[in-house]
Amino acid sequence: MITRPGSPGPASAALFDRFLSTPTMAEVFGEQAIVQGMLDFEAALARAQAAEGLIPGVAAAPIVAACRVEQFDLDAIVNAGSVAGTLAIPLVKQLTALVAAQDAPAAGYVHWGSTSQDVIDTAMVLATRRALALIDARLGDLTNALLKLVDAHGEAPLLGRTLMQPALVISVGFKLVAWVAPLVRTRQRLRDAARATLKLQLGGAVGTLSAMGERGAMVAQRMADDLRLAHAPGAWHTQRDEWVALGCEVGLLCGTLGKIARDISLLAQGEIAEVAEPSGGGRGGSSAMPHKRNPVASMIAIAASMRAPHHVAALLAAMPQEHERGLGNWQAELAEWPGLFLSAHGAVHALADAAAGLAVDTARMRRNIDALNGLVFAEAAAMLLARHLGKARAQALLESLSRRVVSEQRPLLTLVQEAVSATATLGAKIGADELRAAFDADAAARFASGTVAAQWADLRQRAGAFGAWPPFGPDAQPSTLRSAIQ
């Protein structure tokens, strides 16, 4: 293969894109993969047109044989493409020259009746299918790792926090349902969006396939079958709604991953220390402080959640495309698309690895609850007293006692017991066991877990139902590519 000078080869994404993503995803959208996708289109086109009698049958074989990316000068294609206005023109020129060197008459049938956007859109669909397969697999890994954490620690009491402050006692299982539920929903929506989106682009100059006449529809059907893509009812050159909707779903995934990462990073702070990402082997270290254990997986996912909105906004901004073929907006969409998937895969890959080795310190969770001297049970105590004092008086009393907890560093339970004993009517109506029960962290955790038990049952069933789906499986490799290799 001829590579561009100074290019890192297939992982040709910018340095910091690669730093925040994975080599695998960078390869999916690298120059070699995209150009091979364009060549897969050309090979499928030749085969379909030969089968429909639009080009001589003997012309298809030399065209297909030439559709190997290693035979092309990628540097020349990129440089000439910026002048021509599309990468397809210099690619077709090189392909024509390669075919002519082996079979001059066949060269006249290269790219017959198609247009540049057909080639590039289909190549991006093929790349996106592979990208979605990578994301889908790691989504499954992340979900399964979180389910194992719930199995191991789901009933453990944990501080629930609102507005960055301790609120009430929940459970680990209650906490994690807010992570897993969006993952399961997003995985299903991505699959649904892919079914609607992963389809052939073939329309010719203005979308009518006029150069192919009445055979155009059958050529499109044959190509879709050959490339294992859905058959579109017509060209979607400037109908970008379904395509951009898929991009929006990837953006939503980045937001969900960012929420999980934000929670992990906060729980992993040294002052909290309730969870910790895996360490060792140079992971999460500091160049200056040997004691550091930085949550680097969370860092990658948070970075993705911050970058994704800009990519999605650019996709939406590019939707108003002029007439039958856009000027500048389609090209902007192409440039933004890979970055969205690079971010998403970097985030889900990092979090899946981290979740598989996430350390959960339930003892520290308990100590953090105890360190608050019962303040997180103030609501429960107020509700108990409200049955006898009324809501307003009970609320005022607990607010006063809570301030004393902070100033005197005494447990709230003790202060409430004293207040109850000092009031004859309360002492006669509220037993010691009933009062202590309002301050029971385990009971609060069990209650929290109970509120999400049905949701967990549904999530486990839905997560377990995700099986291999053909567009995400190994059979999705384009048949033209297999034939070209053979």
Image (tube, rainbow, N blue to C red):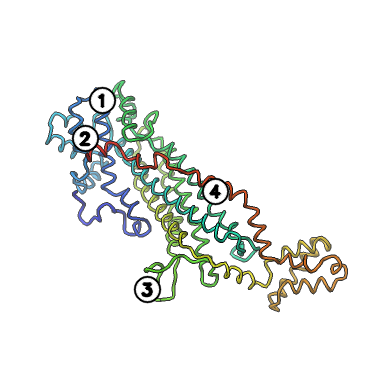
Secondary structure found at label 4: helix
Question: Disc 2 to disc 4, how far (Cα)?
Answer: 46 Å
Report if the CB atoms under discs 2 and 4 are less than 8 Å apart. Answer: no
- Give the label, 3 or 1, closer to the camera: 1
Rendered position, 459 above or below 357: above
Rendered position, 260 above or below 205: below
**Could you say which quadrant of the image residue 5 lies in?**
bottom left
Which residue is labeled 2 in the image?
64
**Among numbered discs 2 and 4, the one appearing first in the sequence:** 2
Q: Percent position (x, y) of residue 272?
A: 55, 70
**Among numbered discs 3 and 4, the one appearing first in the sequence:** 3
**Could you say which quadrant of the image residue 99 lies in?**
top left
Find residue 287 and name its label: 3
Q: Percent position (x, y) of residue 140?
A: 46, 50
In front: 453, or 275? 453
Which three-letter amino acid code belongs to the residue tagged 4? Arg
Which residue is labeled 4 in the image?
460
Question: Disc 3 to disc 4, how far (Cα)?
Answer: 41 Å
Q: Is residue 186 left or right of residue 57?
A: right
**Among numbered discs 4 and 1, the one appearing first in the sequence:** 1
Question: Disc 3 to disc 2, how far (Cα)?
Answer: 52 Å
Secondary structure found at label 2: helix
